Image (cartoon, rainbow, N blue to C red):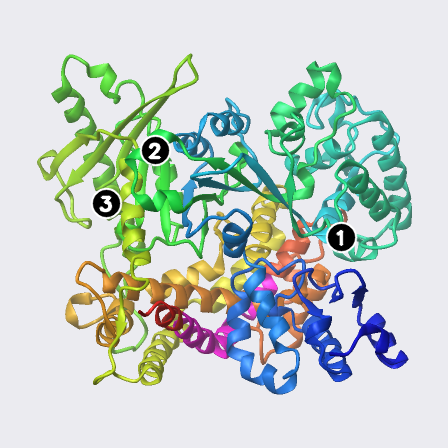
Amino acid sequence: MVKHEELSERTIQLLKSTGITWDGHKRVYFTQLHKEFYLKEAEAKTEEHIIQFCNLVRYLQSHLEYGVSIEWGDSELNKYVYKINKENLKNEFELTIETLSRFYDDSDIITFYKNVLRAKNPTIIDLIGTTGAGKTTFCQQFVNKEGKEILEKTITPSGNSTIIQTDIVILEETESRLFLKARTKRDILRDLVLVALSMDTNFSFDLKKSISEKSNKEGLKKVDEKEIKYDSDIFQGVYNLFRTDSLIKEFLEIAEELQTKYSGKNDLQSIIEDNIEDSSLATLLDSLIERELGFNDFYGYRHEISLVDQTILDKTIIPTKTFNKFKEKKEEFAEIISYRILFEQAVLVFKCDERAKLKLPKKFREGIVFRDSQGHNKSEQVGIAIDFEVKNKILLIPAGTGGELVDDKYVDELKNIIISEPEQNVVVITKLDKCSAHEYYEESYNDFIENLKDQVVTTHNNLVAGLSEDNVNEGDNEKYQLDRNAVVKKFIAAFDNAYLSKITKLKSGEFDTELHRIICKGKNDEMIETTDIDDIAVTNSWYDLLKQILERENKVSALEGKIKLKNDGVEPKDELIEDLVHQMEGILDVCFKNFKWQDQLEKVLSLHSWDFRYIYYEFYLWYNRSIIKDISSSGYNAEDKAAKIVKYINSLVLKSDNKINAVEAILEVPLTEFLKKRYDIGSEINVNGIAKKIISNAISRATLISYKLFDRNIIKNTSGANINMIYMDSTKYLNPNHNTNKYGVSKRSYYTDTAVYLGIYCNLFAKFKYNLETYFLNVFKAAIEIEIESLDSIVD
């Protein structure tokens, strides 16, 4: 081991120039990339180890696909890029490669659940639903009294709740805890710069009123005497961060400096990059965070916030409307500001409800994570978010108010969701109206059931009526057809076994819950009658809807120590994986040849001619979910293109064999047979389900990684630079049919970060086909290898 004190001056200077700092107390070399990427002094056997570590840091600084940074460190996708390049990295950085391997082990969210929260083997469930569907109320049924009270603070009567993505972790033994993940400095300053450039710095704001009040809206600039439709969440968030007399004065003074300095410039991204460090705005932000929160290494990291201070929830996770009400009505809030604009994700940890613990399988005690990926903005609902990485999903859909059980507007949104196998999806129709609820039919249970049956039949048949009549032949391909109904049929199958729920909060604070289960024998692509519904059964326990997920997860986790590796006559793993990759290559080739790439490119570029006031919020959510995080968020205009490709692949069927799904027939079936031959697994284990999960993960991860990981650097570019790249390299980018003026790329003269998001959006799609051709198969292969290695690791 070489001690730091023994290093040569040349190596000391190399450390400094690489941004590596020495912690003499911990005896560790820390990098500026991420606090979990470091070199212990004990690991540096020679000075050459330290020099090579510096070289590795510089390599990672220019290769963002590895995700060793504050911005990207949380992504589960990073480790797949590491996997496919590990051997090359070993050759180049043999002495320090283990520091990189450790980073992937220590930085992901699952490690956080297990190590920090002590969740033994948590089951993660993605809660999907439109605003006001009752996701928070749903979670309240599974937590203790204190948890119920805290969650109650996040609900408003209007249905507008927190825009932060929220994980609710339920453990058998724990105190209530709050963790908040800070946004990156660049993302916070983007919002601050936008607001600073858009405010009248001479206007006197009434701090008791919200920014959207008519008296305060006069303080926002206009273009050609027309009011710009600013996103209220961002403006309100920034305003609430500086919502005291002293802070708003300081902010407006800096805003005036910025407006003078950047007069005539309209590319927001270049202004943001100019103000990341060593600017008055950055200094104001840094000092505010240090004074109010007192955290070191704040930006981009997860921090525990003490719940001892009773106002901390008011400053962080309560709805904006509630905070505005407090500022207006409560004198004690005069000097209180809201930190919500600083954070992107909340993790609330609660002790489980005792009744739930008694009625649910043992798996419940190992930890449940309800992940609410959906932001909330009822007035501008723009699609439903889902988490690619989470296969267990509960879809909460508010009941219709007419003859249908589900309104068409919600069905249209649900069609945008990539739904895995029906048994992995629990559909819950929430908020049954009083004419549908059992209590309304106390004297005639049969009338109640018949009324519900009529609504179920109407909804089912409307879904079926919307199915396309024919499959689409994919060009001159002899093997595949496109089944446009594949995803919708999976939703119908899930709907035909849905739960119907009604939750009423009593004056005592407790909840009266009512739950029913549809049992339908009809086919999911055919019209049905009420006689096709076997029953709509009232369940004895609200918790039954969670049992099927937990019991299935129990079977998977029960594999550990209960499977054995067969040695005789087993097909070699490498041979099987190569065959799967070959079959996947054929499916991908159909996608390359027949997906409407050029039409889609023209569509995304043409969005520049739209009124940005009406598409801003979609692209803000797309950027923060689909790019910064790994959450699919498909809006009406900001379509998730990665999700679109995954849906396309999963919708291909074989022309022969009764139109069997192609992924199932040529990928899942061979893998299932291989797993049965490779392992000695009991009959109670669903091996086919394991194979489906492996293939589904491999396809979604390979698509997502190809879509965005190798182009992470473009988020720092100006919108113009990202659009120009499309025209400059025809070997990697699809070629647009027109010049930029035809699409209206440069027609605006006012500040907007919609153009920044749209530049990223267009650039990524224009290069998407090239990236799929270049990276998809390698990642697909690596993903399957990782899954099989994981199974091998639990062999008895």
Name the secondary structure under disc 1.
Answer: helix
Mark 1 / mark 2, whichever is N-terminal: 1
Q: How many other residues sit within 10 Å of disc 1, few (<14), some (14-19) or many (≥20)? A: many
**Residue type at mark 1?**
Leu
The residue lying furthest to the bottom in this view is 91
**Residue type at mark 3?**
Ala
Residue identifier under label 2: 356
Dot label at residue 268: 1
- The structure residue drawn at horizontal position 64% and vertical position 54%, both measured from the top left corner, is 757
Residue identifier under label 3: 465
Please, is residue 37 above or below residue 388 in the view? below
Please, is residue 765 above or below residue 366 in the view? below
- What is the magenta range? 762-786
- The structure residue drawn at horizontal position 31% and vertical position 69%, both measured from the top left corner, is 796
Q: Nearer the viewer, mark 2 or mark 3?
A: 2
In-front residue for pair 607/99 = 99
Q: Reply yes or no: does residue 779 show up in magenta.
A: yes
Q: Can see residue 229?
A: no
